[in-house]
Amino acid sequence: MVSLLPAGAAAQTHRMKNVALCNGADRTSSEPQIRGCTALIGSKGETPRVLAIAYNNRGNAYVAQGDYDRAIEDFDKALTIDPTYAKALNNRAVAFGKKGQHEQAVRDLDAAIAHHPGYALAFANRGDIHLRSGHFQRAAGDYSEAIRLQPTSAALSGRCRARAGLDDVHGALADCNEAVKAGPDAAALESRGLAYLKLGQWDLAVADYDAALTMDPQRAAARYGRSLAYSRMAAPDRAAADVAGALSAAPDIADEFARFGLK
């Protein structure tokens, strides 16, 4: 079929399709976003700003695929174009965090916040890194700032876990209740399960872990936490089954709970 559009109009229509794809218009998988961004990056005449956004968005798509090294390469390119691009700094930090490179992640998040002091997500992500490192006081401070700027279930859930690590169990439970009320989602329920474990309320912990696993059966932390509750409830067979499933998915999961004083 012959197009009735002038050549320039057809090219612009094609470009706008790639812009939409690069911005995540097709969520069926990460591939359409990668294709759209790659087309923009390979085309001539795009502004540096568009190219920086295209590299950043393609990096996010690679993160979604678990290809963290490729993602970091794209975030590097975005930041070569614009070193003050706070979103790219934040997103590169997420990729570094996924690789366990926590120091690099914190440096990027420090820079993102320096360039954009109101960036709630960067505070929450830095809280996540501090939480994984066992720096509960720092994590709680970052989550509090994220909540002040933009309250979300994720930030409340994170502060719940940080407060649990600091043995502020009732404060943790208050945060988790708010997170569940805002959601509920599997992460919030899993975090509240942790708070109930710290309180010794085993049946309530099991109920929340059950609900989290119904939403997302792959959550190793929920399975391991439930095993600890079952062991305290004198249900050794159930505890053993959950431990086996959790450790097969996340061999270091026991260390994560040990940081919260739970073994």
Image: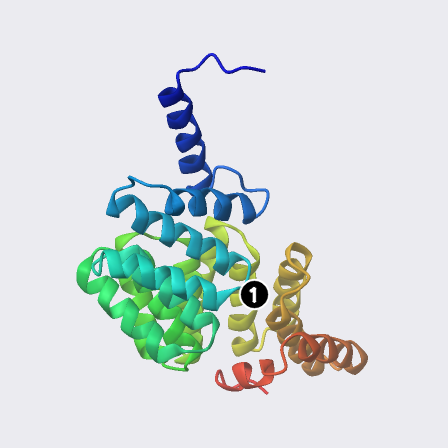
Q: Residue at x 66, y 68 (%)?
A: 206
Q: Residue at x 56, y 65 (%)?
A: 190
Residue 133 versus residue 149 in the image, above or below: below
Residue 50 versus residue 114 in the image, above or below: above
Q: Is residue 149 left or right of residue 65?
A: left
Q: Nearer the viewer, residue 42 or 156?
A: 42
Is residue 117 something that shows in the picture? no
Residue annotated with mark 1: 190
Residue 71 drawn at (x, y percent):
44, 62
Q: Nearer the viewer, residue 150 or 104?
A: 104
Q: Residue at x 55, y 84 (%)?
A: 262
Mark 1 surroundings within 10 Å by alpha-carbon count, few (fewer than 14), some (14 through 19), many (20 or more): many
SS assignment at label 1: helix
Q: Amino acid at mark 1?
A: Glu
Specify the farthest residue to the right: 237
**Split into 4 quadrants, where in the image is the N terminus?**
top right
**Split into 4 quadrants, where in the image is the C terminus?**
bottom right
Is residue 219 something that shows in the picture? yes
